[in-house]
Each structure stands twice: as C-alpha cells, then as structure tokens.
Image (cartoon, rainbow, N blue to C red):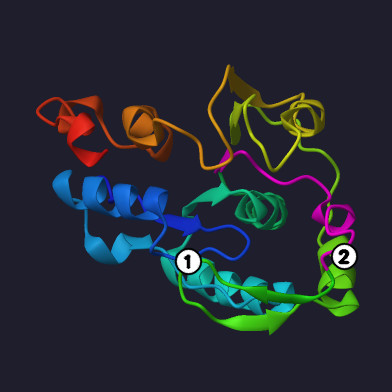
Amino acid sequence: MRKSPSVVYIHGFNSSPASLKAQQLRRAWLQVALPAEQLQIPALHHHPERAIAQLQELIAQLQEPVLIGSSLGGYYATYLAQQHHLKALLINPAVRPQHLFDGFLAEQENLYTGERWLLTDSHLQTLAALEVAPPNDAERFCVWLQTGDETLNYCLAEQYYEGCSVHIEQGGDHGFQRFAEHLPALFAFVGVSSSALQSLDFSAFE
C-alpha cells in the first residue's frame, strides 16, 4: 500500500499559517482527503535559528516530507532539502536574504499576528550561515517565479536555481497570484495521483 505523501509548508518573512497560500493549500489538502496530520504548516519563530530547529523537528517526525517554501521560507527549504536530500517546491524564493535587509535592522511587526520583534545582526549572521551552494537537481527542486514580484528580484532566483526546474510567469506579485490554479501541479510534485484530483474544482480555493 502506497503511503500518503507528507508536506511541510514554510511561510515567509513576517508571515504565518494564516497566509492566503497556506490556507488555500490546507483546504485543498483536506478536499483531496489526505491525512490532516501529514500537512504541517508551522508558525515559525522570527529568528532563523529557532525557525530551523522547528522545521528540523517536523522533518524528523514526518520522514522525508516534501518541502514547500514561500519567499524566506524558500531559502529555509533550500537549506533543509540539501541537508536531508528532500524534494522542495519554492515559490518566489529569497536568495541570500542576509543581503536584502539593508535598513531593516529595526522593530518589525508580523503581518498576521501583530507580534513585534527586533531584527538584529544575529538574524543576518544566522541567515548567512544557512546559505548553500546552488542546487542543480531538476528532479528534487521546482521553482515558481513571477516577474511582477515587487519584493524580490526574480532574476536572482532564476540564476541561482539555473540547474533546477524553473517556471517563470509574467506579471503576478510577491504573494504569487493565482496560486490556487497551480495546486494540481503542486499535488503532482508532492506525489498525489492525478486520479485523486479529477473531481476537484480548484478554482473554489481562490
């Protein structure tokens, strides 16, 4: 009997499990009748060291999950996928984020929880320590980019993930517009059979 796939969804900077993509994925996962416990969407600590520890624990529990990372979550997913030889689907992933926070070393506020916290050099040093060589495995890494990303330069990810399966869409934004339309491709990458998806209307998750 084929075991059910498992997934860890990794949200981005100042985001949470309440983000639109995370909620759309959760609703679709349940509609496909996959075990709820096999989809983990943790609320990550703002410090990378704590966040990675949370994710390492989940990976150990789920045993070879597929990682889905958005923005900064894509950076975390890349590090963990390389470390554990896992599959990873990355959505507008951050590349070398330690260089992107110029002028941001100040109080931050989580967009969903309202939590206030201070971004410090310790955060950036830990991010830098998580950097890995660009992956070149098109079977394990799938990267979705939208050129209209107003937060990250998609060209950086296009170059970094050159050896992977990279899909670039014109327009869109950092949140990745029309994510629900991509759910069939996401489930295929995770390993869900196409027959399990035939009766579903994914537009209902918009």
Q: Secondary structure at mark 2?
A: helix
User: Farthest residue toward the left?
Assistant: 199
Residues at marks 2 and 1, CA–CA distance in whole angstroms: 23 Å
The amino acid at mark 1 is Ser
Residue 168 location in percent, x, y? 61, 20
Residue 16's tag is 1
Which residue is farthest top? 170
Residue hosting label 2: 129
Q: Position of residue 54 (x, y in %)?
A: 57, 76
Q: Is residue 56 above or below residue 182?
A: below
Vertical order, 169 against 146 (above or below): above
Residue under the image location 51 percent in, 78 percent down: 114
Q: Hey, what amino acid is under mark 2? A: Ala
Asked which quadrant contains residue 126, the reply is: bottom right
Q: Is residue 103 magenta?
A: yes
Q: Which residues are magenta?
A: 88-104
Q: In the image, is 96 to the left or to the right of 75?
A: right
Q: Residue at x 71, y 57 (%)?
A: 83
Question: Which residue shows up at 69% across the image and 43% down it?
Answer: 151
